[in-house]
Structures are given as C-alpha cells and as structure tokens.
C-alpha cells in the first residue's frame, strides 16, 4: 500500500509518512474511542444527576427503533421483545466508540475532521433526545452539548499526548504535550511528526499516553456506572410512589374449583404480575408521577374531559379477568397472559364526554408517544367491557405494565389496543390516524386469533411410560373457547377436559390423560372458539396480523 485512497486527500510530500499514519494509528484510534466513552459517560452522569434530562444512549436507541423501515418485518418482530432492548443499548455503546476510533484516526491528520464528527454525533444525539416527550427540551440540548464538549476535551487532550509521542524528543519537557499539538493550523499539526524522533518513540512518552488512556477509561467506567445507576434509581422512585387502588364496587367472585386445573407444570390460570409477559417499545419504562399525571379525553367529543389520577380512582371501579396477547407471539410461545384488571369502564368515560357521530376510531396515546387505534364500534359493542385499567391482580398497575393507567380492550391484540402509561384518549376517524405499528407493516384491524399451547410435557422432554397428563392453555378472546382437542402421532382428535371458562375474554386451561407407550411421539393441539371456528393448521408468521397453526411437539417416552 502506498496511497491513502480511503482516508482522505492524497498525501502531500513532507506530510506524515504512511508507515506512521497507518502503523501508528492505534493511538489516535484509542483516543477517539475513549473520547466517545467520555462523551457517553458524561451524558449518562448528567442524566442521572438532573431529573428530566434524557439519557443519550436511550434517546439514540429509541430513534433507531422508530426509524425501522416499513417492511423490515423480522426486525420489528424482534424489537417487540425485551432482550432486544438490551442488545440495542449495548449496540449504541459499542458502535459509538468504533465510529469514534475512526474519527480519532482522521483527527490525527486533520483536527477539524474529528471535531466535525463529534459535533455531528452531538447533533444526532440532540435531535434524538428532543424527540423524547418525557424530557425537557432545554436539558436534552444541554446534555448533547455537554457530551460533545467532554468528548472533544478528551479527544484533543489524548491526541496531543499521542502526537507528543511523535515529536517530543526531550524527556524533561513536561506539561507541554497538551498544547504543542494543538498549536497552529490543525491541518498541519501532525506534519511536524516528520522529525526523526517520530520513528523512535521513547518508552516514557508511550507510557504517559497509556496512563492517560487508562485513567480516562477508569473515569468513563465510574462516571457512566454512577450515571446509569442514578437513572435506575429515578425510575425506582416512581414505582414506590404508586398509590393504593380502591376496591371495586363490583368485585368478581372467587374462582370456583372447576375454573382452574392443577396439573403440575401447567401455566396458572391467573398470571402473577411478576411473571406476566412484557412487550413495549420503551427502552426505559416511563416513570410517571401520579401527582401530576393527567388523562385527556379529546377529539370528536361534545365535552373534552381531563382526569387526574385521584379523579379516575374516584370513578365507579369495575373488575374483570381479561386475557391479553401480543401479535408477535409465535405458535407455542408465551407472549400472552390472563390477569384480573381493575379500572374504569371506557364506556362510562365516553358517555360522559359525548362521542360525536362519525367518530369511528379511538386512539390511545401514551406518555412516551406510543399510539394504538381501534374501532369505536368494537369498544361500544354491548358484549364487551373495555376499560381504563388502574389495577392488575388487585395491585396498582406495575410500572412495567403501564402505571398509572392503561387500556384493556377484550379481543384485540395489545399493539392496537392496550396502551400503557396512558396519556390521552382521542376520538377521531378510522382514516385520520394510524397507530404506531400500522405504518410499520402490521394490520390495522387485529382481533386476537385462536391459539392453543401444550405446556406439559415440555417439548423435547422424556417421560415415563404409562399414565401421563398432557396439559396446556387455549385462548380466543373474546369469542371464547368451546373445545380443545389433542391428537397423538396424527391419530384421531380426542376432546380434552377444559377448565370452566371465566368468560369469553379469558383463556382456558385444558388437560388430557394419555397412556404413553415407549418411543418418540408427536403431540398436537387445536382449539375451537366460541363461534364454532376450528383453529387452522395452516401455519403463518406473526406479521402482519398474528401467527396461525397448531402447536405440535415431540416427546420421548422411555
Ligand atoms: N405505551 C405503550 N403501550 C403498549 C405498548 C408499547 O410499546 N407502548 N405495546 C403494546 C403491546 S405490542 C402489547 S402486546 C401490550 C403488552 O402489555 P404488557 O407488557 O402489559 O403485557 O402492551 C401494549 N401497550
Ligand atoms: Mo404486542
């Protein structure tokens, strides 16, 4: 290689020899990567210390989520999940230093290029942070500024040290390395490195660069760690502040003995809050202060209304079991759960507001800007009771599940109905607004499809020959489940015993005794919903409107 094709203008005679530009580039690269670390850590620390300041990592991650190209369905399916958020945060933290390492290498030749890259990063982070509806705009911009400033101080300081390695021959001259490289024309600063000393880097200056780098890295880890845990603490505060939900006027009766089955390993009929699946786009769970939170009911209504948390709790409360499900649940998966929800009847609220004729859609918007939309007719139908839920299994809504209030609409997938951290309910037309996931390729109309799942035995498990209980759950909210059938090795369908349904809005448990014979066996389940429709065996992906197909597992008997 005798040329710098990819790294900028052709080398001018007398500039850095290529050997040094490439062979020596690890130091500028380290300087750049560390400077990115300093920028990120400084912004995490500020976000942790000053309430209302967005974390830039979180903001950039949220921007990435919202920029998913329509049609990239697999990516979006994955982003529904919780682990992917961790991956996204880690991605931001890993990618930024890699890009910044390149900025460092460029900056070693042209200071302004490195500075420009850091400023560009600041603009990106600032723009991302401004999109955060929970953050103060001034603090968002300020924090991006802090990040850029801290990053540039680190970048220029470390580069000066790295350059010092190249042209400072005199070991006695201390304290000058910070300025020497920054003097004069930034474009020319490295050209001085052409001196002879350049080729014989003294051990002591190398060590000085390493010490400064290690010190910077230590500072990054400590500041970033402190900032991050302070952010987590802010979030914990909000959970602690959750108040008590009053008892509903109409309490549901305790479950009867035949309403729940007790096969070991079977999913509980009522899913405890701590085990309930969680799906949302929030990289950090919104922390909502119930003292200042308000719910607006607006749009095509005769009387726009606003409720405080206390006012909402003072409304007649109602409770019901509803099974909610995620559209991205693949056959056999667990993104579904049944809970006892306490809340205000949505119909009561809409009646008070006076829905205008022609208002065909209800849009639920969360404090973090997420939206859902569902037909007004679905919500108003006499056979179902959608609600603004404030309680989950007789506890205030956990923060993960939407504290202080969320929508629960029987029969619809969560992404078109179940807005958590609810901020407003808007009456509009079906045409006027698309909820968050609709432009990203998911169906606008999304009733929950009939699904059934085998929980016991586990797929791939080995069981003893003889009497074995096959058991699982089946759901088709809010058409209800009428029958569940199981077949072994493609034999005849056999009716399972099902738990007496709590309502059409909930799942059922089912069980079937099986005389297991040695060998490998296929077990398959299908359900029939309350309208008599048999669950199709034709499989489909979750996108765009939910997964179809039978759950089929292989077990060993022996
Ligand atoms: N604010 C907000 N609400 C949301 C979502 C979201 O991303 N943000 N995701 C929805 C989706 S896709 C589902 S499946 C349900 C899941 O509710 P859960 O996490 O309480 O189980 O919440 C819905 N409500
Ligand atoms: Mo979902």
Image: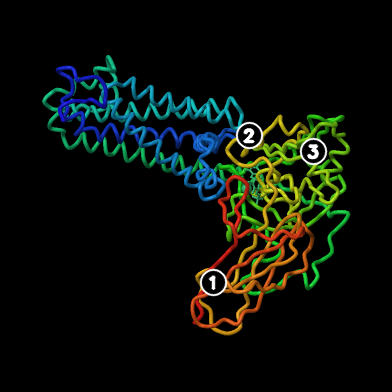
Q: Distance between the residues labelled 1 and 3?
A: 54 Å
Residue 18 in view, yes or no: yes
Which callout, 2 or 3, points at the residue further toward the start of the chain?
Answer: 2
Circle 2 packing at 10 Å, graded few (<14), some (14-19), many (20+), is: some
> Mark 1 sits on what residue?
522
- 538 with respect to 485 (left or right): left
Label 2, on which residue? 134
Ligand 1 closer than 8 Å to label 3 CB:
no
- Answer left or right for 354 relative to 414: right
Residue at 54% x, 68% y: name it: 553
Q: Residue 280 falls in which quadrant of the image? A: top right
How far apart, in angstroms, are the residues tagged by discs 2 and 3?
18 Å
- The label shown at residue 308 is 3
Dot 3: element: strand
Is 236 placed above or below 25 here?
below
**Depth check: 192 or 388 in front?**
388
Residue at the image point whose x is 20% and y is 26% from the top: 173
Q: Where is residue 536 in the image (x, y as percent from the top left)?
A: 63, 58
Looking at this rendering, what residue extends furthest in the bottom direction?
466
Apparent side of residue 458 relative to residue 157 in the rendered image (left or right): right
The quarter of the displayed image where residue 303 is located: top right
Seen in the picture, residue 295 relative to 271 is either above or below; the reply is above
Question: Could you tell me which residue is drawn at 48 percent across and 27 percent down?
Answer: 124
Residue 208, compared with residue 457, is above or below; it is above
């Amino acid at each position: 290689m005798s040329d710098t094709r990819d790294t900028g203008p052709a080398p001018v005679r007398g500039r850095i020899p290529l050997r040094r530009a490439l062979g020596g580039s690890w130091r500028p690269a380290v300087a750049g990567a560390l400077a990115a670390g300093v920028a990120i850590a400084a912004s995490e620390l500020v976000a942790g210390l000053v309430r209302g300041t967005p974390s830039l990592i979180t903001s950039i991650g949220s921007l990435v989520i919202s920029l998913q190209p329509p049609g990239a369905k697999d990516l979006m399916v994955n982003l529904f999940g919780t682990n992917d958020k961790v991956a996204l945060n880690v991605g931001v933290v890993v990618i930024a230093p890699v890009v910044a390492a390149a900025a460092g290498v460029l900056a070693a030749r042209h200071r302004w290029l490195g500075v420009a890259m850091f400023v560009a990063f600041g603009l990106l982070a600032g723009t991302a942070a401004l999109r955060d509806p929970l953050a103060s705009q001034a603090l968002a911009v300020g924090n991006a500024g802090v990040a850029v400033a801290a990053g540039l101080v680190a970048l220029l300081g470390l580069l000066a040290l790295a350059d010092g390695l190249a042209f400072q021959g005199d070991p006695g001259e201390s304290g000058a390395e910070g300025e020497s490289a920054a003097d004069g024309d930034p474009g020319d600063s490295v050209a001085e490195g052409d001196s002879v000393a350049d080729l014989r880097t003294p051990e002591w200056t190398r060590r000085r660069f390493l010490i400064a780098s290690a010190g910077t890295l230590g500072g990054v880890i400590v500041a970033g760690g402190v900032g991050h845990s302070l952010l987590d603490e802010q979030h914990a505060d909000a959970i602690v502040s959750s108040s008590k939900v009053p008892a509903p006027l109409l309490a549901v009766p305790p479950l009867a003995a035949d309403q729940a089955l007790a096969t070991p390993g079977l999913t509980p009929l009522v899913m405890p809050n701590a085990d309930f699946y969680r799906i949302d786009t929030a990289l950090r769970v919104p922390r909502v202060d119930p003292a200042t939170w308000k719910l607006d009911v607006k749009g095509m209504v005769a009387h726009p209304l606003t409720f405080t948390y206390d006012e909402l709790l003072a409304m007649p409360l109602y409770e019901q079991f509803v099974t909610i499900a995620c559209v991205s649940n693949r056959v056999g998966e667990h993104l579904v759960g049944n809970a006892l929800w306490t809340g205000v009847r949505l119909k009561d609220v809409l009646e008070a507001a006076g829905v205008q004729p022609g208002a065909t859609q209800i849009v639920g918007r969360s404090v973090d800007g997420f939206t859902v939309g569902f037909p007004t007719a679905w919500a108003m139908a006499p056979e179902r009771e959608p609600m603004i839920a404030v309680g989950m299994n007789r506890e205030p809504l956990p923060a993960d599940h939407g504290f202080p209030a969320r929508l629960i609409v029987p029969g619809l997938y969560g992404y078109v109905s179940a807005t958590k951290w609810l901020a407003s309910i808007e009456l509009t037309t079906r045409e006027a607004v698309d909820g968050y996931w609709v432009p990203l390729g998911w169906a606008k109309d999304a009733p929950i499809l009939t699904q059934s799942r085998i929980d016991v035995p586990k797929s791939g498990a080995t069981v003893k020959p003889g009497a074995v209980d096959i058991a699982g759950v089946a759901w088709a909210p809010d058409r209800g489940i009428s029958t569940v059938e199981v077949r072994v090795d493609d034999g005849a369908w056999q009716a399972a015993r099902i738990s007496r349904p709590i309502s059409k809005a909930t799942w059922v448990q089912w069980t079937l005794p099986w005389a297991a014979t040695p060998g490998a066996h296929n077990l398959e389940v299908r359900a029939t919903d309350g309208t008599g429709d048999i669950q199709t065996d034709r499989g489909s992906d979750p996108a765009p409107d939910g997964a179809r197909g039978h759950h089929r597992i292989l077990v060993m008997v022996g």
